[in-house]
Amino acid sequence: METQPELQALRDSIDNLDAALVHILAERFKCTQRVGELKARLDLPSSDAARERQQVERLRLLARAANLDPDFAEKFLAFIIKEVIRHHETARVRADSSS
């Protein structure tokens, strides 16, 4: 079948993109881990509602520009933010226990 090579090429591209997403998310979480440690040292709250609102607004604009559903992008960001806050709370517990 002629479509098989095309299908495989598309799947290979998807696999490459998935790998890139994982590496990008890992780098993002390295940065947010440092933010969490800094917030713990400075006794700042784990979440920042104003920053989160700005990020949602920014991401929705980026999604529209990329022809991606802004609602999907917002849900994806909400999932990431939830995990980041969990990491920040863990950093706070570690900082409190080492004091």
Image (cartoon, rainbow, N blue to C red):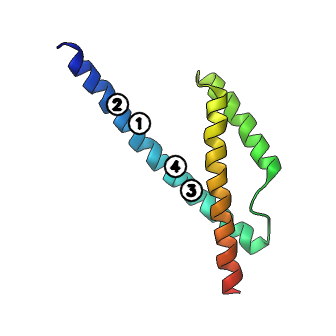
Determine which residue is flagged by label 2.
13
- Give the residue type that dot 3 points to: Phe
Q: Earlier in the sequence, mark 3 or mark 1?
A: 1
Q: CA distance from mark 4 to mark 2?
A: 18 Å
What residue do we see at 75% from left, 46% from top?
52
Numbered mark located on residue 25 in the image: 4
Q: Amino acid at mark 2?
A: Ser
Residue 9 visible, this angle = yes
Residue at image position (71%, 87%) is: 99
Circle 3 Cα neighbour tier, 10 Å, few/some/many (<14 / 14–19 / ≥20): some
Quarter of the image where one finds residue 17: top left
In the depicted structure, whether residue 20 falls above or below residue 94 = above
CB-based contact (under 8 Å), mark 1 and mark 2:
yes
Please give the residue where the numbered disc 1 appears in the rendered image: 17
Element on which disc 3 rests: helix
Residue located 79% across and 64% down the image: 45
Disc 2 residue crowd, few under 14, some 14–19, many 20+, Cα 10 Å? few
**Residue 35 placement (x, y as % from top left):** 67, 62
What amino acid does circle 4 point to? Leu
Instruction: Look at the numbered discs 3 and 1 and tell me whether their residues touch, using CB distance below 8 Å.
Output: no
Residue 67 picture quarter: top right
State the residue lying farthest toward the left. Answer: 1
Task: State the separation of the CA atoms marked 1 and 2.
Answer: 6 Å
Q: Is residue 51 left or right of residue 85?
A: right
The residue shown at (78%, 48%) is: 51
The answer to whether mark 4 and mark 2 are in CB contact below 8 A is: no
How packed mark 4 is, by other alpha carbons closer than 10 Å (few <14, some 14-19, many 20 or more), is: few
Q: Secondary structure at mark 2?
A: helix
